Each structure stands twice: as structure tokens, then as C-alpha cells.
Amino acid sequence: MMSSMVVMLVLQLMAGLLLGFVFFVGLWLTVQRMPGAKRPALLFVSSVVVRMAVVLAGIWYLAGRDPLAIAACLAGFAAARLLVTRGVAADDGMFGRRSVR
């Protein structure tokens, strides 16, 4: 019983990590496209709405009402933030592009 709970928490942590990557890489891509966009405000707002909807729906679907599962998803999300920001701050930037400084 206890081992299955640990496995579920690890899976929810990994799912939160994936959701975080989707959110923060989407943010990075949005910021990269904004200088050339005809309507940068519309691009930014629509990106925020889509990214938030994906993350909130994912956490709601994966964790339900279990506070421990929500915490695991959020821990994965926070870890993704650290990994993505370090990837963007690297010399080559994320995906091999030069990062904005």
C-alpha cells in the first residue's frame, strides 16, 4: 500500500515537471516571438491564457483533491522552472539559440 502511494507521488512529481516545462518553454517562446509580432499584447495574453489553462487542467486532472498529490505536482512545476531558467541563462540559450540578456 505504501509503495504504491510513493510510486503515484513520483509519477505526479514527474507530471508536474512536464507541465512546468510546457509552461515555461511556452513563455520563453512567446517572449522570443514578441519583438516581431504585429500585436505583441494579444500574443502575450493569449499565451498566458493557454499556458495557464493547460497547467491548471493538468494539475486538476492528475491530482484531483489530494493535497499531497497537488504538492507533488507543484514541486515538479517549481523544479521545471529552475531547469528552464538555467537552460535559458546558459551561453547558448535554450534550443541552441542565443538568450536575451
Image (cartoon, rainbow, N blue to C red):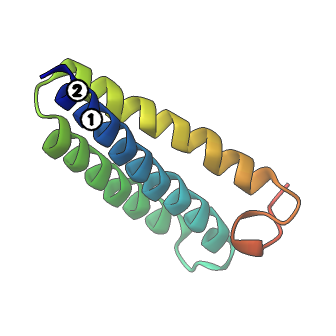
In front here: 32 or 45? Answer: 32
Residue 8: percent from left, percent from top: 23, 35
Indicate the amino acid at tag 2.
Ser
Residue 72: percent from left, percent from top: 34, 29
In the rendered view, would you say 40 is above or below 68? below
Mark 2 → mark 1, Cα distance in angstroms:
6 Å
In the rendered view, would you say 76 is above or below 98? above
Mark seen at residue 50: none
Q: Does dot 1 land on a helix, a strand or a loop?
A: helix
Residue at the location (14% across, 23% down)? Answer: 66
In the rendered view, would you say 44 is above or below 60? below
Residue at the location (38% across, 63% down)? Answer: 46
In front here: 59 or 29? Answer: 59
Q: Does dot 2 land on a helix, a strand or a loop?
A: helix
Q: In which quarter of the image is the N terminus?
A: top left
The quadrant where residue 61 appears? top left
Residue 2: percent from left, percent from top: 19, 20
Indicate the amino acid at tag 1.
Val
Q: Mark 1 points at which residue?
A: 7
In the rendered view, would you say 24 is above or below 4? below
- Residue contact between numbered discs 2 and 1, judged by CB atoms under 8 Å: yes
Q: Name the residue under label 2.
A: 3
